[in-house]
Image (spheres, rainbow, N blue to C red):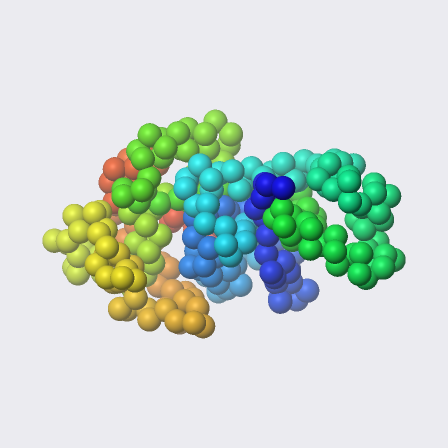
Amino acid sequence: MNNRYRLTSTVYDREDEARKILPEKRVFLSVEGNVTEKEYFDGLSKNRVKIGINAKVDVEVLRRGKKDTNSAPLQVIELLEEYIRLREQNEDDILQEISEQFKETFSLDFIKQYLENPDTLPRKKRNLFVSELKKIGYDINYRKYLKKYNDELDEFAVLIDTDMHTHLESNMFECIKHCRDNGYKCYIVNPCFEFWLLMHLADIETEFGDQLDKIKENEKVSQQHIFVSREVAERAHHGKSGINFVGKYLPYIGQAVTQAKKFSSDEYELVDSIGCNLWKLIGELKMYGK
């Protein structure tokens, strides 16, 4: 069987879900990175009231498996559209989708019962079914979690970087056009997401005014780092415990927004010019409900 499903998570419900205000609108965001971007936006979500963001709007980063390294711009859009298709499916569609994969192994009645009330099934066969689902990348618990959101106010967005060493300009332009044609927000960081992080940590004009070409080229400078990620690492000291959003980034979001506005913000311009338009997302979140 092919691994055709990518929406997956080992933790499909947030710890604070029961305590927080249920948002009336979410921005579902598909990102390239599997760790740093997710940690940043999870931190943004958990601290949105402190930032001045109405608790009734939230950002939900779509998650994929740890071994899923499909991070090219078009693949980021594919992950988003997998979720959009999931929202449009009814229970019969989901039943049919799963049964087509396992019709020779599990009966339609078994699958239907699993979807409706899995606890009534024998544990051994239930665990085998879940194991087989995971082989094709079908994380049923996470998909159920995402399925419950289907508000007409929700928005869909992608976050991609230009990465001049691996991403073709033609692919970037194709992604931007696809997003515009389908009503998705397209957030771009040139050269990489760490440049947005660096805007929280440094005065770009003062410290890097004569090194903007180095930022744009973003060459590999060590076994672990490219130029921009090294500058972030030297200031933020990310470790096994994560990026420390509250300590390193939360107090400086305003600074990052101010600095980002000095660079290119148009999607097409960002394909070839360093900059970032993520400040627009922050601004839209802060304006919600006002």
Residue 27 makes an appearance in the image:
no
Q: Position of residue 95 (x, y in %)?
A: 77, 40
**Residue 81 quadrant:** top right
- Please determine whether, in this image, residue 214 is positioned above or below residue 51: above
**Depth order, front residue of 290/125:** 125
Asked whether residue 80 is in view, the answer is yes
Looking at the rendered image, the quarter that the N terminus falls into is top right
At x 37%, y 59%, the residue is: 253
The residue positioned farthest toward the front in the image shown: 104
Residue 93, percent from left and from top: 74, 35
251 shown above or below 86: below
Q: Depth check: give the residue in front, 84 or 240.
A: 240
Measuring from the top left, give residue 154's x and y in whole percent: 59, 42
Where is residue 28 shown, x and y percent of the image? 54, 46
Q: Is residue 76 left or right of residue 230?
A: right
What's the residue at 85%, 57% (across, down)?
A: 121
- Tell how many labels: 0
Q: Nearer the viewer, residue 65 or 15?
A: 65
At x 39% / y 29%, what residue is drawn?
174
Q: Nearer the viewer, residue 201 or 98?
A: 98
Q: Residue at (30%, 45%) from the top-left corner?
A: 163
